[in-house]
């Protein structure tokens, strides 16, 4: 029997039981569609997270105050890092292309009759470069302004939107906790994450922030930029050596700061998001499996109903393999059609989700192939047992079956 | 053509052995028209199943056109059923969703015969049903269905046609028509083995094999009335 005739026969028997075929196919459609849409949602979340995070720079080493044991615990109260540490790193550690010491705190801003609460970040010359901020208008503060702790500010796009609306902020006087600051520059918007808006902050010289605003001598973090990602490990070691000697920490005892690598952070975020995607896809995959069981179920019913037909076919010369192929083609056809329709439905679902929910979703070719391949594999796997059962029927009994 | 020697078939029903056929031997030559008769349980069906390659004997030998059936692989047996044997059943056994023509065509498809459409149509013409080719079995009368089944049995020009009570589900008049078709096919050279328990059907055959308790009770030649 030619494969064409087998296909024709399989199609005919599927069409003969329209409702049954539709319901069985629906199981596969839902399975494939949910795998594709779930993966697209997970993948979208991952890409969005990564792209936003990578805007902060991937070649940054961050030094934060605190003991190793208190890692991940708020270290605002620890005062072990000083501005002079940042200067020392810039001076003594080679391969470093930028250093930015930072202090930051929320503060109230006022312009005219408008108020807003935002983060005030006191930092140095290199910060914009390190954090991938680009000036939209105006200028950044100069070395002289840092040394003399002048009240000047570069402001983020969200702050512009909240306080100045249509007005040009450059040259305006802004009140930060009651003191006037001259706006000298505006940053280009980086775009917000749901939990963090990098544009909702203003930047002032670190010295101004320390002496005039916050009243502190220490710094809260020092960002160090590596020229090349490959150099990051070496730089980390050098920083560690330098700070240990500066802080007079003896060999073997814990340091009073820790050094973090931003690309590690990025990777662990990416991994977490990937796990999330796999989890979503895996849960959706279960529905695909259930769809497969539906196929097996319906094929077993169909074979019992068609016992006599199978007997006839064997009597007129069908080989076992041909009987098997006939039923296997039926189940694969169901999973094929279900897979195809499921892809379309999956894409529609993920588009709808991104439109209505406002999430980014990414339907990758990989996820389509994965879901489709899996559905066809499910068709073969769950069709195999019923098909073999059909092929092994005893023709004499089958012909007598009522 | 057919040579059967000491053919026996024993079934196991639970722990009991049932001897459905014991030491049956006979020879059927090409062109014969044989009726197999006997009460139910006499081994007729077992004999037909064995001759039709649907079952293998427990012992003894079966030569079909000098081919020892017992030495064949399952696929070769399927091939024998496809090309050398034609089946006609009491309850027609047509595929309900396929048209008459498609039913007749089916053995050709399994035999990978090219030009199957034309050949199937010719076979339908031989049983006088060419104009009903597109009809499905449920749109045909009992007699017409059986004629489709006969066309399907002869479409591959088999060595023998095995008919198991082909008139059993038909009224007398239609039954006679069907038997006439068998007679005509036999006159054209087809070997026919027909199981029946109707005397007047058997009387159309030229030879009657009487079975009883799994053995051949009588093997006689008749006049063979051909009308």
Image: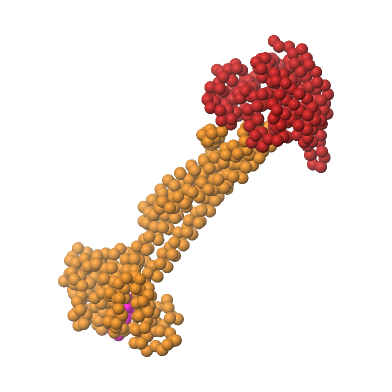
Chain colours: A orange, B red
| x and y, in percent, of residue B194 in the image | 72, 22
Please tell me which residue is depicted at 25% across the width and 77% down the height of the picture.
A124
Residue A32 visible somewhere in the drawing: no
From the viewer's side, name the closer residue of A240 and A158. A240
Question: Where is A355 relative to B59, above or below?
Answer: below
| x and y, in percent, of residue B140 in the image | 60, 21
When asked about the image quadrant of residue A257, the answer is bottom left
Decide if residue A362 is on the left or right side of residue A118: right
When asked about the image quadrant of residue A400, the answer is top right
In the image, which residues are magenta?
A215-223
Please tell me which residue is depicted at 78% across the width and 33% down the height of the picture.
B60
Question: Where is A236 relative to A299, above or below?
Answer: below
| x and y, in percent, of residue B207 in the image | 76, 18
Please tell me which residue is depicted at 18% across the width and 69% down the height of the picture.
A138
Question: Where is A185 relative to B172, above or below?
Answer: below
Residue that lies at the very extreme toward the left in this rendered image: A171
Question: Where is A243 relative to A231, above or below?
Answer: below
Residue that lies at the very extreme toward the top in this rendered image: B227
Q: Is residue B171 highlighted in magenta?
A: no
Residue A1 visible somewhere in the drawing: yes
Decide if residue A154 is on the left or right side of residue A349: left
Please tell me which residue is depicted at 66% across the width and 17% down the height of the picture.
B189
**Quadrant, the C terminus of chain B:** top right
Residue that lies at the very extreme toward the front in this rendered image: B66
């Amino acid at each position: 029997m030619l494969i064409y005739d087998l296909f024709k026969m399989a199609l005919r028997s599927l069409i003969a039981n329209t409702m049954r075929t539709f319901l069985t196919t629906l199981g596969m459609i839902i399975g494939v569609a949910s795998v594709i849409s779930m993966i697209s949602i997970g993948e979208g979340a991952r890409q969005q997270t990564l792209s936003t995070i990578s805007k902060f720079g991937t070649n940054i080493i961050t030094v934060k105050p605190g003991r190793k044991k208190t890692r991940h615990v708020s270290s605002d109260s620890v005062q072990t890092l000083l501005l002079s540490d940042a200067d020392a790193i810039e001076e003594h550690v080679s391969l470093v292309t930028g250093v930015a010491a930072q202090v930051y705190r929320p503060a109230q801003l006022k312009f005219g009759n408008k108020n807003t609460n935002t983060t005030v970040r006191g930092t140095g010359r290199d910060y914009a470069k390190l954090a991938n901020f680009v000036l939209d208008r105006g200028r950044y503060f100069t070395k002289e302004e840092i040394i003399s702790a002048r009240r000047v500010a570069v402001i983020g796009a969200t702050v512009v939107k909240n306080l100045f609306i249509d007005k040009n902020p450059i040259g305006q006087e802004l009140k930060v906790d009651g003191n006037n600051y001259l706006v000298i520059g505006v940053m280009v918007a980086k775009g917000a994450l749901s939990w963090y808006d990098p544009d909702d902050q203003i930047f002032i010289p670190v010295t101004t922030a320390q002496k005039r605003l916050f009243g502190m001598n220490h710094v809260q973090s020092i960002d160090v930029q590596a020229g090349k990602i490959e150099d990051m490990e070496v730089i980390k070691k050098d920083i560690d050596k330098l700070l240990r000697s500066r802080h007079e920490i003896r060999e073997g005892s814990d340091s009073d700061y820790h050094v973090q690598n931003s690309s590690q952070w990025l990777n662990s975020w990416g991994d977490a998001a990937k796990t999330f995607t796999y989890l979503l896809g895996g849960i959706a995959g279960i529905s695909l499996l259930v769809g497969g069981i539906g196929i097996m179920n319906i094929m077993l019913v169909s074979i019992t109903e068609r016992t006599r037909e199978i007997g006839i076919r064997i009597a007129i010369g069908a080989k076992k393999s041909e009987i098997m192929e006939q039923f296997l083609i039926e189940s694969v056809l169901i999973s094929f059609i279900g897979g195809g329709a499921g892809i379309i439905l999956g894409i529609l679902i993920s588009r709808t989700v991104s439109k209505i929910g406002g999430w980014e979703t990414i339907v990758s070719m990989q996820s389509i192939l994965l879901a489709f391949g899996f559905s066809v594999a499910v068709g073969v796997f769950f069709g195999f047992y019923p098909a073999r059962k059909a092929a092994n029927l005893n023709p004499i009994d089958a012909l007598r079956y009522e | 053509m057919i040579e059967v020697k000491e053919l026996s078939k024993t079934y196991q029903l639970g722990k009991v052995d049932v001897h459905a056929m014991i030491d049956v031997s006979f020879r059927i030559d090409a062109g014969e028209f044989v009726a197999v008769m006997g009460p139910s349980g006499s081994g007729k069906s077992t004999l037909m199943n064995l001759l039709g390659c649907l079952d293998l004997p427990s012992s003894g030998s079966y030569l079909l056109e000098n081919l020892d059936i017992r030495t064949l692989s399952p696929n070769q047996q399927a091939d024998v059923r496809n090309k050398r044997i034609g089946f006609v059943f009491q309850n027609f056994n047509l595929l309900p969703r396929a048209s008459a023509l498609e039913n007749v065509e089916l053995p050709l498809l399994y035999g990978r015969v090219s030009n199957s459409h034309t050949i199937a149509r010719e076979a339908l013409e031989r049983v006088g049903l060419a104009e009903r080719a597109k009809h499905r079995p449920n749109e045909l009368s009992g007699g017409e269905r059986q004629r489709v089944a006969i066309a399907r049995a002869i479409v591959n020009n088999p060595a023998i046609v095995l008919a198991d009570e082909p008139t059993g589900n038909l009224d007398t008049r239609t039954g006679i028509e069907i038997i006439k078709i068998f007679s005509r096919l036999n006159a054209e050279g087809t070997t026919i083995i027909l199981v029946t328990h109707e005397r007047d059907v058997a009387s159309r055959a030229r030879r009657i094999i009487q079975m009883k308790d799994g053995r051949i009770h009588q093997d006689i030649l008749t006049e063979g009335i051909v009308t």
